[in-house]
Image (spheres, rainbow, N blue to C red):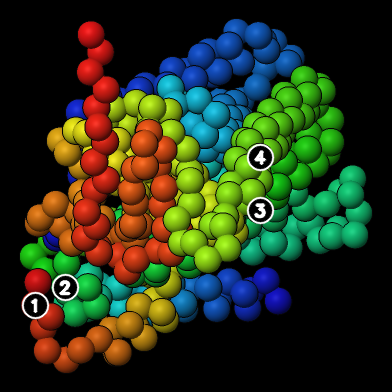
Amino acid sequence: MPGLILLGASIYATVGTLFGAGFVLRGVERVDPAALGAPWTFRILILPGVIALWPLMAWRWWCAPRTRGAA
Amino acid sequence: MSVGYVSVQWNRHKRIYDACVAGGIVLYLGVFFAAGKALYTGRNAISGEILAMRALATCAFLMLNVILCIGPLARLDRRFLPLLYNRRHLGVATFLVALAHAAIAIGFYHGFGNVNPFVALLTSNTNFTSLSAFPYQTLGLFALLILFLMAATSHDFWLKNLGAPAWKRLHMLVYIAYGLLVMHVALGILQTQRSPWLASLVGVGVVIVATLHLIAGQRERRHDERGSQLSPRAGEEWVDVGAVDDIADQRGSTVTVGAGERIALFRYNGCVSATTNVCAHQGGPLGEGKIIDGCITCPWHGWQYRPADGRSPPPFAEKIHTYRVRVVGRRIQVDPTPLPPGTAVEPARVEEVQSA
Ligand code: HEM
Ligand code: FES
């Protein structure tokens, strides 16, 4: 049982990390135009949160307007 | 305020704050470690790992107690406001110190076998029904997860993108983490049969945190109760909320009218304006702020709004509710119906009394 929990957590975190890399590079600007041109330190800083909350942020990215928001 | 994100909006205050926090942590750990080595020698000697783990553990727990006291202290006495200003960095630092403690604990107690140390943590003890043998490490793990979530979502990006109510609820979990940690420490002490001084220190911490919250809460309630007696007389929209002279120049004050939100009043340059008391950032009490450079300045993190229309000065775009206000004689009257955020309202003119 603990093995299963751990496996689940590892899969969640791995998917989150892969998704997170894409999100902080591209998605974040679509979800929140204020992030356009934000420095890489900002992107690193929000990465742990994106990994933890990746399903939510994936949903936000999916729902974000297709065109780039005006900043 | 949000125009393009940066990693941290550094300024002098934050640098000094962070330097004090880092210095304090290093000093605490150093003294703890040195004292442990000096006091326990010979047969009683404690290994470096255990000492480091305990130093980090007590440091993180102490920091958490400080964090929880800052909120009510700042409500009770303005002199504590500078501590509140950068509380988030303190929170992130607490998580990192706690993480180091947990890493040593997991590595040291569970890391030597051939079982994954995390699996060992969850399986080595499953006495969930017994208090004296309860796997207190699991409580620590859950608390650590909460601290992680809070640290990871501490940037303003999260405040904006999760929405203030959800963000606030998430960060309220700190009280659950605190409860879990009190149990973690109490049961840990019980099971390792340590001297009771640590347990009494934890008790003192809990009493201080709880008392401060009760006092601050009671004060707020009394303020609101006084306000609930204020309401417009039948057929009238204006409510008398106090005297102009009760507010110092370039300062604010707070009133509650009926069951409504709190209203902040500001006196500046011979004018009075009224806005919501709730800052658009994290709900800081604007009425306890000052007018700086002609703008209402939140006492918590310094967001600014023009008093006459509740808008942040460009290039910022934040808006807060405003209220219609007038001055009759030396009395201030407001219309307690909030106007849409950012609505311009003519400030009420005050006849300044010329002192001879
Ligand atoms: C995965 C998470 C955690 C694990 C596995 C863990 C493990 C442990 C262990 C094994 C001890 C007993 C140490 C001893 O022999 O004295 C302990 C004590 C303690 N832990 Fe944790 N812990 C965790 C998280 C935390 C967190 C998040 C805090 C937060 C501040 C914390 C604070 C403490 C304190 C104050 C003590 C008592 C220190 C002492 O005995 O001197 N722990 N923990
Ligand atoms: S609450 Fe942060 S600036 Fe007002």
Viewer-side label of 4, 1: 4
The total of numbered circles placed on residues is 4
- The answer for how far apart the CA atoms under marks 2 and 1 are is 7 Å
Instruction: Give whichever of discs 4 and 3 has the lower sequence position.
Output: 3
- The answer for how far apart the CA atoms under marks 4 and 1 are is 47 Å
- What residue is shown with label 3? B176
Number of other residues with Cα within 10 Å of mark 2, as a class: few under 14, some 14 to 19, many 20 or more = some
- The answer for how far apart the CA atoms under marks 4 and 3 are is 27 Å
- What residue is shown with label 4? B222
Amino acid type, callout 3:
Ile
The percent position of residue A33, horizontal first and vertical second, equals: 16, 73
Q: Residue at x 76, y 44 (%)?
A: B183
Which type of secondary structure does the marked residue at label 4 adopt?
helix
- What residue is shown with label 1? A70
Q: Residue at x 58, y 63 (%)?
A: B234
**Where is residue B119, by image quadrant?**
bottom right
Q: Residue at x 25, y 32 (%)?
A: B351
Pointers 2 and 4 within a single chain: no
Asked whether, in this view, residue B312 is left or right of residue B100, the answer is: left
Amino acid type, callout 2:
Pro
Amino acid type, callout 1:
Ala
Q: Chain of mark 2?
A: A
- The answer for how far apart the CA atoms under marks 3 and 2 are is 34 Å
Viewer-side label of 2, 4: 4
- What residue is shown with label 2? A33
Q: Chain of mark 4?
A: B
Q: Is mark 3 within 8 Å of ligand 1?
A: no
- The answer for how far apart the CA atoms under marks 3 and 1 are is 40 Å
Number of other residues with Cα within 10 Å of mark 3, as a class: few under 14, some 14 to 19, many 20 or more = some
